[in-house]
Image (tube, rainbow, N blue to C red):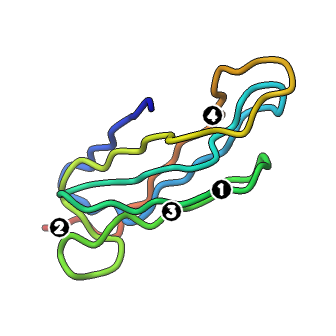
Amino acid sequence: GAKIGFESGTATISRVGIKAGPSSYARPKTVKVYSGGKEVVQVLPNDSKTHWIWTPSVTGYSGSTFDTVYVEVVDTYPGSKHQEVAISELDAKATSAGL
């Protein structure tokens, strides 16, 4: 599937948020978040709310990675009119400035 990467500079990315687009388009169903050789796979509900996924633990603490975090759509819910995947927002939350 298609993927996108988040880089956080000196911070550590703890979670990524995904908000699906309109139901006339395909929506993300199974999403893989991976970084530093570890991954988390989560099935999202078929709605338009933002759903947060913790990044895999690379340093031993939940949701903490200094590497690029990738988000990949593995499969989708079908759209009522179009089968292209619609994502209206992608967000990331950081835990610290790693100074």
Residue 87: numbered disc: 4
Residue 96 position, x and y percent, is: 29, 69
Q: Which amino acid, mark 3?
A: Ile
Q: Secondary structure at mark 3?
A: strand
SS of the residue under disc 2: loop
Callout 1 crowding tier (Cα within 10 Å): few <14, some 14–19, many ≥20? many
Q: In terms of sequence position, does the residue under pointer 3 or pointer 4 come before the other?
A: 3
Gap in angstroms between the C-alphas marked 2 and 4: 30 Å
Left or right, residue 88 beside residue 81: left
Separation of disc 1 and disc 2 at Cα? 30 Å
Q: Are marks 1 and 2 in contact (CB under 8 Å)?
A: no
The local secondary structure at tag 4 comes to strand
Which circle's residue, 4 or 1, is located before the other in the chain? 1
The residue beneath circle 3 is: 53
- Residue matched to label 2: 98
Task: State the separation of the CA atoms marked 2 and 3.
Answer: 21 Å
Q: Position of residue 56 (x, y in %)?
A: 33, 67
Between circles 2 and 4, the one closer to the viewer is 4
Q: Which mark is residue 44?
A: 1
Q: CA distance from mark 3 to mark 1?
A: 10 Å
Tell me: 95 left or right of 41: left
The amino acid marked with disc number 4 is: Ile
